[in-house]
Image: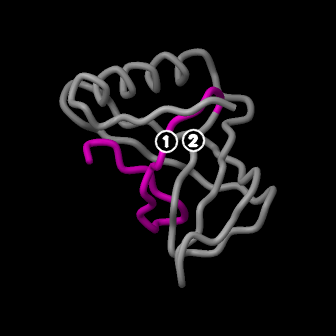
């Protein structure tokens, strides 16, 4: 996908975007309340976006694969606007999935 968050250098897969955060899957175990950086882009005319993310909850999806609910505490308004542009770009390309918290 054009939007590939990373956690501690490991690629994670966004499952869905939710208000204030995202649900992602990863093969790397993370503890609740741990933090990491989710990095998007750059892609097209969108600049690189790095967001501090905190693990809210985790659950196993399959052997060696975990689902994490992530929040973006303290995200600035500028980063929120850029994240919105990434989401609009994904919706236009039919790649975004959203959920409700």
Point out the image quarter for the C terminus: top right
Q: Quadrant of residue 85?
A: top left
Image point (57%, 41%), residue name: 22
Q: Are marks 1 and 2 in contact (CB under 8 Å)?
A: yes
Colour mode?
one colour
Q: CA distance from mark 1 to mark 2?
A: 6 Å
* Mark seen at residue 22: 2
Q: Can you give x and y, in whole percent of width and height, for residue 96 in the image? A: 36, 34
* Mark seen at residue 16: 1
Is 18 magenta? The answer is yes
- Mark 2 is surrounded, within 10 Å at the Cα level, by few (under 14), some (14 to 19) or many (20 or more) other residues, namely many
Is 24 magenta? The answer is no
Image point (57%, 48%), residue name: 23
- Mark 1 is surrounded, within 10 Å at the Cα level, by few (under 14), some (14 to 19) or many (20 or more) other residues, namely some
For the record, the magenta segment spans 1-20
**Image check: 36 left or right of 95?**
right
Image point (54%, 84%), residue name: 63
Comparing 46 with 89, the one in front is: 89
Image point (53%, 54%), residue name: 24
Q: Is residue 92 above or below residue 68?
A: above
Q: Can you give x and y, in whole percent of width and height, for residue 33 in the image? A: 81, 56
First in sequence: mark 1 vs mark 2 = 1
**Image check: 11 left or right of 53?**
left
Q: Secondary structure at mark 1?
A: strand
Q: Is residue 32 above or below residue 43?
A: below
Q: Secondary structure at mark 2?
A: strand
Q: Is residue 16 above or below residue 85?
A: below
* Mark seen at residue 82: none
Q: Can you give x and y, in whole percent of width and height, for residue 47 in the image? A: 32, 30
Q: Can you give x and y, in whole percent of width and height, for residue 66 in the image? A: 58, 69
Q: How many marks?
A: 2
Q: Quadrant of residue 80?
A: top right
């Amino acid at each position: 996908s054009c939007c590939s968050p990373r956690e501690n250098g490991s690629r994670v897969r966004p499952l869905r975007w939710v208000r204030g955060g995202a649900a992602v899957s990863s093969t790397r175990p993370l503890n609740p309340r741990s933090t990491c950086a989710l990095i998007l882009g750059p892609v097209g005319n969108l600049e690189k976006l790095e967001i501090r993310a905190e693990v809210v909850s985790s659950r196993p999806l399959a052997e060696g694969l975990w689902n994490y609910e992530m929040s973006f505490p303290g995200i600035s308004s500028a980063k929120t606007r850029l994240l919105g542009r990434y989401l609009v770009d994904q919706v236009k390309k039919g790649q975004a999935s959203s959920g409700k918290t």
